[in-house]
């Protein structure tokens, strides 16, 4: 079975100068707690759980939430819940315990930032969002990571790691009454703080024209990226955006694969939209072949979008809807994969939309996608990015 | 959820039933290996793309559209000379999707225009792969560990690109013919109806062709430890693949003991392995460091490899920390506590894989396609869990001498190349 505890805190809650704090804190939740110290344990109960039982454990942070999960044989439910309850309140944050993990996070940052696709996407979001915190990546900026202190982390932890900011999932062969009883026995003593949860509602100002950004790298490839703003998950418009991106980029049948990869202008195309509650930037990224200019790709992409007609969208819509529905079927197969998808619904404020996802996908029509395309791909909604090789 | 396995003259068929299943996963593997050469590697890069490029009355677009509109996710890859096919689809459209797969396997079009397109695409993908530091390091380690006449050898990307220019349509037809003459391993998870449908199709696809003999022999490299460094200045970390040839087949009685010891050192995934506990958790030197034996079959040997990455400013400190753990393991072996702990960890992983029917099938197929029947799979897994501590430590002593390990690195090497050279010489 699987337990999954999601805190509704992520990169969006970080102030300038403290980007990446939510992710750094995620790493620190695998360190010993005050409870572990009382037991005179040198390592965290979560790590001991993994070694003692062979359970699967991990966590991840995104723009709006941080989530922790365990996958384990059924008999271990109490242990999993005990660990989550203890680390909700008992994490020890000191500069000596922070330092090694800070090194790991810097290493992780370098892993991402060394990838030109990631670096260009980060630049795109930075250009697209002047005010909204979606403008910075979840990993944060390197200088901010280097400047973390235990004091900053402690403040963030106390602000956001609390029972009224958390959603717990238990998925597996257990009765509702037994599960609730177990939750009560482990979490029942944890009280809700009197202070409000710090929330900042930052509205991105309207975009007044096309935005551009360029990064230069000594890579062996050149990249072109087209970003367009869209509504939050799981609104109808979000699904229109998701399906349109798939129509354009998903697989060899896709519009841009045929126009660019099959003709030798590009070696690959990809695209995606993120499941965030606030409006975000969907992106299409193209790897140019040697000798293809950025101008040629931009012109060709814009032409493809302009010429994308109802018949093509209709035919491709059926393909991408069928594929997405298959993905949703497979996402419900196994407790870990159920937890993954349910987490995104939780993070967007309404877990119950999980049941409605297939209907939301199926209800998107060709007319919807045509109308979305007309709205989304105007200059005042676009950000264009280039990664230019310097060697 | 209990698997069954039946074998005919031309295919082996494993099924896994789960009640109320509304999804089906199909996996097919066929060994097409003939001989190792750059030409064969280039050819292998093309076959998956070309099989998906039209069949029967469908052109490429028509075939892909037909599969996509059924919601079918069909993937083909080749690795170490083996073709792998995976189909994931809803139960309600499985029969039609399988029909398309049958058409693809029976009557691929292999048109000249698609051949030209596939060659160009493959060249472009190779250019893109130049920046993949992780893969470059792994491929370089393979070149250190395997003879160029061995199926696990990975030619440099530039050589593959040149060889693509010499591949002909007749070559592709010949490789496809090898597919028809190979023994197939097919595994399916889904309701009973999917199993019976699949078996019917397989019997029609595979009456009783003459099977080509499997090539069991393997050319051995006169191994010497080497250091290979590839400069990729666009990256920010140096990706490392460290290892050596492991002269054990899966059937060798020492393999389970060695695999157990490797697990204690660097269990892939999670934090339980020594390397993650020390190099990552204690020293904060890397986000990930894992190790495992790989690429062995029941009749051919593979290698042992450790994969990690360090920032250039910390690469020597990172390598030192890694080597400290390797030396400790080599000198003292695993402890009694670790022996007990990892027996539990391995037993639990067998339970957890069944959390998902399709993940379970994926694991079953990994053994199936290596020609394990169900009893042999169970015996092999049991042997991994029940080896004695003495056997583990003997295997470590025999095969994990740190002074014998090769190192391959790719990333921003330039500024630290001489330091790494000096370090490597010191480790001999």
Image: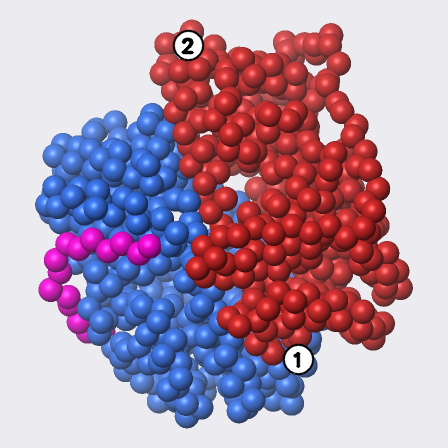
Quadrant containing the C terminus of chain B in the rendered view: top left
What color was chain A assigned in the picture?
red
> Which circle marks residue B61 in the picture?
1
Q: Give the main secondary structure, helix, strand or loop, of the magenta stretch.
A: loop
Quarter occupied by residue B386: top left
Q: How many marks?
A: 2
Q: x and y percent of residue A156 in the render?
A: 61, 18
Quarter occupied by residue A69: top right
Look at the image and tell me whether residue A185 can be seen: no
Residue nearest the observer in this picture, B309 or A127: A127
Residue nearest the observer in this picture, B329 or B140: B140
Specify the segment rendered in magenta: B216-231
Residue matched to label 2: A37
At 69% from the left and 37% from the top, the residue drawn is: A134
At 45% from the left and 33% from the top, the residue drawn is: A106
Q: x and y percent of residue A99 in the render?
A: 41, 22
Is B35 above or below relative to A197?
below
Spatial CA distance of label 1 from label 2 is 62 Å
The blue chain is B
Q: Is residue B381 left or right of residue A231?
A: left
Residue nearest the observer in this picture, A260 or B89: A260
Report in which chain the residue with disc 2 lies: A
Residue nearest the observer in this picture, A1 or A148: A148
- Does the CB distance between marks 1 and 2 fall below 8 Å? no
SS state under label 1:
helix
């Amino acid at each position: 079975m699987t337990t999954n505890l999601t805190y509704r805190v992520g990169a969006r809650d970080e102030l300038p100068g403290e980007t990446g704090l939510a992710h750094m804190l995620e790493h620190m939740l695998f360190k010993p707690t005050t409870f572990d110290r009382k037991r005179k344990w040198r390592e965290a109960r979560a790590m001991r759980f993994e070694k003692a039982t062979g359970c699967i454990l991990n966590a991840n942070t995104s723009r709006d939430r941080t989530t922790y999960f365990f996958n384990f044989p059924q008999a271990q439910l109490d242990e999993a819940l005990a660990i989550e309850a203890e680390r909700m309140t008992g994490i020890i944050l000191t500069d000596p315990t922070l330092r090694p993990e800070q090194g790991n996070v810097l290493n992780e940052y370098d892993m991402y930032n060394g990838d030109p696709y990631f670096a260009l996407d980060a630049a795109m979001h930075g250009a697209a969002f002047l005010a909204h915190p979606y403008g910075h990546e979840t990993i944060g900026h390197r200088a901010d990571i280097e400047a973390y202190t235990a004091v900053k982390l402690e403040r963030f932890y106390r602000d956001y790691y609390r029972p009224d900011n958390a959603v717990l999932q238990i998925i597996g062969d257990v009765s509702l009454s037994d599960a609730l009883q177990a939750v009560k026995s482990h979490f029942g003593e944890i009280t809700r703080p009197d202070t409000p949860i710090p929330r900042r509602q930052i509205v991105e100002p309207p975009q007044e024209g096309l935005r551009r950004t360029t990064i230069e790298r000594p890579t062996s490839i050149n990249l072109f990226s087209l970003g367009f703003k869209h509504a939050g998950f799981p609104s109808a418009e979000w699904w229109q955006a998701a399906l349109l991106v798939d129509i354009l980029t998903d697989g060899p049948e896709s519009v841009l694969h045929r126009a660019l990869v099959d003709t030798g202008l590009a070696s690959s195309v990809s695209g995606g939209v993120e499941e965030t509650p606030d409006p975000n930037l969907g992106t299409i990224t193209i790897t140019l072949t040697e000798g293809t200019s950025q101008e040629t790709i931009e012109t060709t992409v814009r032409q493809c979008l302009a010429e994308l007609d109802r018949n093509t969208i209709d035919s491709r819509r059926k393909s991408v809807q069928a594929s997405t529905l298959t993905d949703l079927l497979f996402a419900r197969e196994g407790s870990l994969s159920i937890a993954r998808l349910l987490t995104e619904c939780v993070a967007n404020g309404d877990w119950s939309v999980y049941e409605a996802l297939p209907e939301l996908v199926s209800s998107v029509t060709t007319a919807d996608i045509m109308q979305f395309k007309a709205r989304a791909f105007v200059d005042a909604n676009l950000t264009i990015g280039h990664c230019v090789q310097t060697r | 959820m209990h698997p069954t396995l039946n074998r005919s003259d031309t295919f082996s068929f494993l099924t896994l039933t789960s009640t109320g299943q509304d999804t089906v996963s199909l996996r097919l593997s066929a060994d097409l290996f003939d001989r190792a050469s750059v030409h064969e590697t280039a050819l292998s890069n093309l076959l998956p793309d070309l099989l998906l490029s039209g069949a029967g009355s469908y052109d490429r677009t028509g075939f892909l559209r037909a599969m996509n509109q059924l919601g079918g996710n069909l993937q083909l890859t080749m690795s170490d000379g083996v073709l792998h096919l995976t189909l994931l689809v809803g139960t309600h459209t499985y029969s039609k999707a399988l029909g398309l797969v049958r058409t693809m396997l029976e009557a691929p079009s292999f048109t000249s225009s698609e051949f030209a397109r596939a060659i160009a695409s493959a060249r472009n993908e190779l250019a893109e792969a130049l920046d993949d530091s992780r893969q470059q390091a792994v491929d370089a380690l393979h070149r250190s560990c395997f003879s160029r006449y061995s199926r696990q050898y990975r030619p440099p990307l530039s050589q593959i690109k040149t060889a693509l220019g010499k591949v002909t349509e007749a070559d592709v037809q010949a490789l496809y013919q090898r597919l028809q003459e190979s023994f197939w391993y097919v595994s399916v998870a889904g309701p009973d109806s999917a199993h019976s449908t699949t078996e019917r199709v397989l019997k029609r696809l595979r009456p009783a062709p003459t099977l080509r003999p499997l090539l069991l022999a393997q050319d051995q490299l006169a191994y010497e430890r080497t250091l290979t460094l590839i400069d990729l200045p666009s990256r920010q970390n140096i990706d490392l693949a460290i290892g050596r040839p492991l002269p054990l087949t899966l059937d060798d009685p020492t393999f389970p003991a060695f695999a157990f010891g490797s697990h204690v050192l660097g269990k892939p995934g999670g934090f339980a392995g020594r390397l993650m506990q020390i190099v990552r958790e204690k020293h904060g030197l890397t986000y990930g460091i894992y190790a495992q034996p790989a690429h062995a079959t029941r009749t051919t040997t593979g290698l042992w490899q450790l994969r990690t990455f360090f920032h250039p400013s910390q690469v020597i400190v990172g390598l030192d920390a890694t080597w400290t753990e390797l030396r400790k393991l080599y000198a003292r072996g695993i402890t009694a506590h670790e022996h007990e702990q990892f027996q539990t960890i391995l037993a639990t992983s067998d339970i957890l894989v069944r959390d998902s029917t399709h993940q379970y099938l994926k694991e079953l197929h990994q053994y199936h396609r290596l020609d394990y029947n169900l009893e042999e799979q169970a015996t092999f897994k049991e042997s991994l869990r029940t080896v004695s501590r003495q056997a583990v430590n003997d295997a470590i002593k025999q095969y994990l001498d740190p002074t014998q390990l090769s190192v391959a690195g790719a990333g921003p090497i330039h500024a630290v190349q001489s330091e790494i050279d000096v370090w490597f010489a010191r480790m001999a």
